[in-house]
Image (spheres, rainbow, N blue to C red):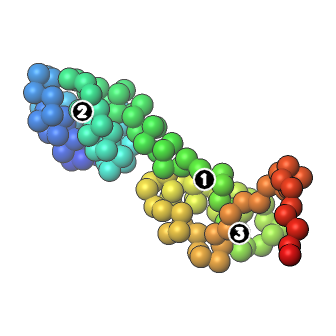
Amino acid sequence: MDRLEATRLTELVEQMCPAQKINNETPAVWAGLLRDVRLVDALEAVRRLGMRQPFVSPADIVAEVLVVRAERLDGIDQWRGHYRGDPDDARAEIDWWRGCIRRIGDGERHDEVFEPQQLTARKMPALDNLFRKVPEK
């Protein structure tokens, strides 16, 4: 987050939390503290925080951003994309997976990250013997 984005964020906080002290230096300080936070994530965090507490700190924003991103990633372990690169290049495959996880954490939907033919439900062979098969008639 840069200073311009932090200015926008602190203006929102000032409107949502009128008792909170915000001055001309606040955006610069918050920009430094929130430099690794995307503005869109911070805005969502402030929206949530403003509905439940009278003051919002950068630490509160970071904690809530972690919750927001975790919610976006909830269930990602149930989907498996198919890496199409060199199967012998483990580093490239790891980088591809990290990119997919980052994009979903950033708010893209699973079907936007994985191509339709890449997206499959994960099978759980360990559960196969738990269910009785119904004979066909």
Point out the tag, 1 or 2, that comes first from the N-terminus. Answer: 2
Quarter-of-image position of residue 118:
bottom right
Which of 114 and 36 lies nearest the eye of the viewer? 114
> Is 123 located above or below residue 45 in the figure?
below
Q: Residue 115, how many percent across, how many down?
A: 59, 75
Q: Is residue 105 above or below residue 112?
A: above
* Crowd rating for badge 1 (residues with CA inside 10 Å; few <14, some 14–19, many 20+): some
Classify residue 99 as left or right of residue 58.
right
Rendered view: 25 above or below 95: above
**Number of residues whose C-alpha sits closer than 10 Å to that of mark 2, classed few (under 14), some (14–19) or many (20 or more):** few
Q: Nearer the viewer, residue 74 or 14?
A: 74
The spot of residue 14 in percent (x, y) is 13, 33
Label 2 SS: loop
**Quadrant occupied by the C terminus:** bottom right
Please name whichever residue, 18 or 96, is drawn nearer the observer in this view of the structure: 18
Dot 1 or dot 3: first in sequence order is 1
Q: CA distance from mark 3 to mark 2?
A: 41 Å
Q: Of the residues shown, which amino acid type is indicated by label 2?
A: Met
- At 51% from the left edge and 56% from the top edge, which residue is drawn? 104
- Read off the residue under disc 1: 76
108 relative position to 27: left or right: right
- Which x, y percent locates residue 135? 88, 68
* Residue 125 % position (x, y): 85, 56
Question: Which residue sits at x=58%, y=59%?
Answer: 99
Q: Secondary structure at mark 3?
A: loop
Rendered residue at 42%/42% (across/down): 68
Mark 2 or mark 3, which is nearer the start of the sequence?
2
Q: Which residue is mark 3?
A: 83
Separation (CA) of disc 1 from disc 3: 15 Å
- The residue where tag 2 is placed is 51
- Could you tell me how far apart the alpha carbons at marks 1 and 2 are, in whole angstroms? 28 Å
Residue type (three-letter) at the residue carrying disc 1: Ile
